[in-house]
Every structure is written in structure tokens, then in C-alpha cells.
Image (spheres, grey):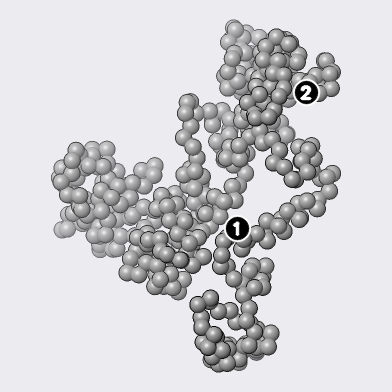
Amino acid sequence: MDVIDNYGKASGQEVNLDKSSIMFGKKVPAEVKDKVKSIIGISNEGGMGSYLGIPESLSGLRVQVFGYVRDRLNDRVNGWTAKFLSKGGKNSDGNDRGLHWVAWDKVCKDKAEGGLGFRDLEIFNDALLAKQYWRLIQFPNSLFAQVFRSRYFRNKHPLMAKKLYSPSFGWRSFFLTKSLVEKGARWTIGSGFNVLVWRDPWIPDQHPRPAQGRGQHLHPNLMVNHLINPRTKEWHLPILQEYMDPEDIQTILSLPTSKSFRPDRLVWHYTQSGRYSVKSGNKVAQDMKAEIEVGPNVNALKAKAWDLLVPPKIKHFFLADHLGFPSGDSAISLPGVNCDTICKRCELEEESINHTLFECPHSRQVWERIFDGPDMDKFPVGSIYSNLDFIYGKGLAHMALGTTHSSIPWLVWFLWKDRNNKVFQGLQS
């Protein structure tokens, strides 16, 4: 109260005790509550309201505490008039999930990886929380770090903290991002006294990692300072050659050593400055969540759609084409969906994206007028990725006179529109 009084005298802003409230924990005895309220002069107990749109009390389940955010968002979205929604948005009343033709994880991939670049809010929230965990490491003397250290990692490094019983809401949220911080943290060598050679991440590879030994290393608790000549403060090459994998030796020799033996410190591996950024943290979190893809990587081919000299709707169409556009073969695999999978234009084969755009006799006639040359016997083929690779690159050298590069994506677009006119309206071009 002395601090509050001094602030009021200095700023001229007095606290209105009649309008103020005080919040106690559940385990505070009633007599203590009465005594504190008497000393402070605040008789109202709070905790159930909100301040700046955030609940005063964050106890309980997060789903319940922040449920008001979801409810407020739903009210605002459902209040929009239908004229502002796309045709896809008008097909749902908001009470059912509908059909999702593309997985959300694929939509949230970077554009360079063939996705739409949408932001996964759960992953982005983890990246924001990880920034607070990183502050515990980089600013150990701050009030923020001192408060959490006294409760959760006393006399320990923040990365050595353990999950405790009944933690606060804040620490529980920070602690969930510990694996993300560990994934991107790397030790820069000063004295080397605090870094374990075979356990701590200090080698700046694609991802930070410990050193690799030559065969079976004899010292499991070997510290990095044992690899440095104490007289010259340079890397001790004979010791490196004795213990280290030859591929790591050159990497280690390129690392600077401290002439004054400054303390070892943690840096963020995925930025040049070594400082944590939410953008890089979000990328690392996405990589941690991504599934291992089996087979050839076609991300570079998918990303070419963003370089097309066409309006955005055509670019999105090509990405949807990559990711699995709704057609007969994609619909047949969905539970509860019964449809005829035969191509409605030729009525000869089962419909697929590749068949509709490239292999259907109707589409083949169009492509024969666009491309000519010796490579046309290799186009189209049974792989949609091979066909797209052809029209993105090699096929440009075989375009008929008067055909431009930018007209090819439009042609693919109109082939799809023609298919839809036949399927849904019975129109035949």
C-alpha cells in the first residue's frame, strides 16, 4: 500500500478503493482474508469478472476458461450475411462439419512446400509461448525469471525443469513448449566447461546436435573444454582426431573459441542473430508435427503454382489439383458417399483428376492442338505430377504457334469447368 500511495502522489492518480476488488486463492483461510482486507481497505472480493477482455481468474480447464473466445467468434462469424461467403461457405449451416477434401495440415504448409500458407493457430500459439520460455534462459536475472525459478527450477537451468504437481496455468503453458525450445537451442562454446560433448547440442548441423564419436568413445562425460588447448585456447587437433568422427572435425575447427574463456551460452540455431523469433519457432513447430512423407518429394513441383502468371483463383486451383481435388476417385473413398465414378464425358474409364484433365479423349484432343513435337508421345501419362511437370517446363518448347505460357493454366481451368458443366448441368461443349 505504501508503493501504491507513493505512485498516487507522484502521478496524481489515486486508487478508488470502493471500486476495487481483491482476489484470494482457494486455500486462504477466512480470518486471513478479513485481516488482509482490513489492512488494504478493499472489502470487495473479485476474480469472476474480466479485465481488458481477459478473465481475472485463469483457474480450471483452459477449454472452459477461454470458451468465451470461441463463443464470441462464432457469434461474429454467424452474423455475416451469406452474400459475403463463397459458394463453398453457403453449402453449410454451421451445425455440421461438412466434407473436407483437403487435410488442414496440408493447407497449413508453407507455399514453398505446396501448401496455401495458412497459419495453424495452435502451433503459432506454441511458438509464442516458447518465446517466453526462451526469455527464462536469456534473461535469468529478470523478475519474470526469478519468480518462476523460485518455484519450478530452483538452482537448475530452465531446460532442466521437471513437470511438477499442480503448477500454475502460466508455467503449465510454458512447460508444454520445452521440447520446441530444446529442438532449436544450440550451445555456443566459450569455456566449454558446461557442455557435454556427446549429449548437449553444440554442433551446428542442419539441426543442432551433439558430436559424433569415432567408434566407442571412452569418456561418456567428456566436456568440450577437454577438446581445447588450455595454453593456446585453440581446438586441440590430436584429441579431436582421437575421439571425433572425421566429418565433425572440420565443423568443429570452424567454430570460434574464446580467448578469454567466456561462459558457454545457448543461442537459437534457426536465426542468424541467435535470438529466438516467433517466425522461426513456428517453422520448427510445424516440422515437429509434420508426418514423414513416403515416396518422392514433389514440394518443389507444387510450389511452381505460385509462379504462374495468372489470377490467384487459378493458382489455388492448381494447388487443389495437387492436394486432391474432389472427383469420382476421391469421393468414392469417403464414408457415406455413394456416387458413380465413371467419367461423365467419355463414359469409358473411372474418373480421376489426371483422367479428367489429361487422359480423357476430350482433353487429349485439346492438348494435341496445343503441343506438338517428338516429346508428345510422353504426354500425357498416368501420373498427374509428370503431366504437370511437362506443362510447367519441357512442354513450353513444344507449344503451337500463338499459344503463350500464361494460357496453359487457363486451359486446365476451363477443362475442369467443362467437366463440371457436364456433370452438374448436362451441358456438352
**Residue 114 placed where, x, y %?**
58, 34
What number is the disc on residue 63? 1
Q: Against 61, is 199 above or below?
A: above
Residue type at mark 2 is: Asn
Q: Which residue is tagged 2?
A: 420
At x 42%, y 52%, the residue is 179
Q: Against 295, is 132 above or below?
A: below
**Residue 33 placed where, x, y %?**
55, 86
As drawn, is 154 to the left or to the right of 217?
Answer: right
Gap in Å between the C-alphas at discs 1 and 2? 42 Å
**Residue 113 placed where, x, y %?**
55, 36
Q: Which residue occupies the foreground of this view, 151 or 25?
A: 25
Q: Quadrant of residue 242?
A: top left
At x 44%, y 73%, the residue is 147
Disc 1 versus disc 2: nearer the observer: 1
Badge 1 or badge 2: first in the primary sequence:
1
As drawn, is 267 to the left or to the right of 355?
Answer: left
Q: Judge whether residue 111 can be spotted in this image.
A: no
Work out which quarter of the rendered image holds the C terminus and state it. top right
Which structural element holds mark 2? helix
Residue type at mark 1 is: Val
**Residue 366 placed where, x, y %?**
73, 13
Which structural element holds mark 1? helix
Q: Judge whether residue 20 can be spotted in this image.
A: yes
Q: Which residue occupies the foreground of this view, 231 or 353?
A: 353
Work out which quarter of the rendered image holds the N terminus and state it. bottom right
At x 57%, y 60%, the residue is 62
As drawn, is 394 to the left or to the right of 162?
Answer: right
Q: Sort mark 2 into few (<14), some (14-19) or many (20+) by Cα contacts within 10 Å.
A: some
